Amino acid sequence: MPEDPDSELVSRVRAGDEGAFAELAGKYQGSMLSIARGYVPSGAVAEEVVQEAWIGVLRGIGRFERRSSFRTWLFRILVNRAISAGVRERRSVPVDDMGPVVDASCFNAGGTWQVPPEAWADQVDDKVIAAKISARILSAIDELPLQQREVVTLRDVQGLSSGEVCAVLDISNANQRVLLHRGRSKLRQVIGSEFGRDR
């Protein structure tokens, strides 16, 4: 397993360093809230779920065996807490969810782009437009169906590997690839239709 980028912070948290815990919380809090909101009926409940997850981390950090990365372990705790909040039935993916998709040949077997979309944010002269596009992408992620939102957030926002996403969400690799493909396709459609960008 590659070196965990959070390894030093985890060691410091185990040693009682409150600053290290605050740094981890700052790093992951936003993504955790986004994921939790997909399982629960309100932002307030999502905040409670995230708080419970952090309490679980503090209680279990001494038993964390580092068989996975810290963030994989953290997001698994979060998902378990969210599920126990009573929204398990919302995790199903409708079989007929066959909205517009990008040609499958755009992605490799691992679910990543064959040729990544151009780095448009670096080329936009008007930074206000770039900020609007970024904000719209984030809101469009929030509008995705739950499992698509989870997979896109974990893969594209947090940078987890497909294997880590499967472990966090307890889904098959094939399901992860389909959810990622559909989520990315919907985001691409939003950007294309609202900002005239097809990549």
Image (tube, rainbow, N blue to C red):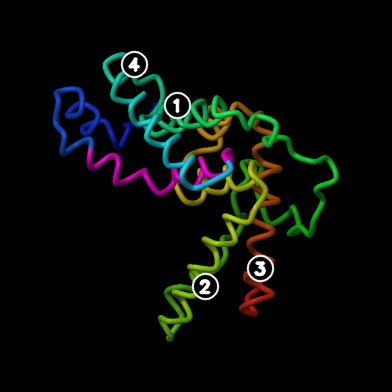
Amino acid at the residue labelled 1: Ile
Residue at the (68%, 49%) spot, across then down = 181
Magenta stretch: dominant SS?
helix
Amino acid at the residue labelled 4: Glu
Q: Which mark is residue 77?
A: 1
Residue 43 lies left or right of residue 60; in this view the side is right
In the picture, the quarter occupied by the C terminus is bottom right
Quarter of the rendering containing residue 33: top left
Q: What range is drawn magenta here?
A: 22-40
Quarter of the rendering containing residue 91: top right
Looking at marks 2 and 3 on the same chain, the residue that comes earlier in the sequence is marked by 2
Residue at the (66%, 29%) spot, across then down = 172
Is residue 130 part of the magenta span, yes or no? no
Kindly identify which residue carries mark 2. Answer: 133
Looking at marks 2 and 1 on the same chain, the residue that comes earlier in the sequence is marked by 1
Q: Are marks 2 and 3 in contact (CB under 8 Å)?
A: no
Cα–Cα span, label 2 and label 1: 32 Å
Kindly identify which residue carries mark 3. Answer: 190
Judge whether 162 appears above or below 111 on screen: above
Cα–Cα span, label 2 and label 3: 10 Å
Q: Are marks 1 and 3 in contact (CB under 8 Å)?
A: no
Residue at the (52%, 45%) spot, across then down = 155
Few, some or many residues within 10 Å of mark 1 (<14, 14–19, 20+): many
Residue at the (73%, 54%) spot, across then down = 105
| Residue lying furthest bottom | 125
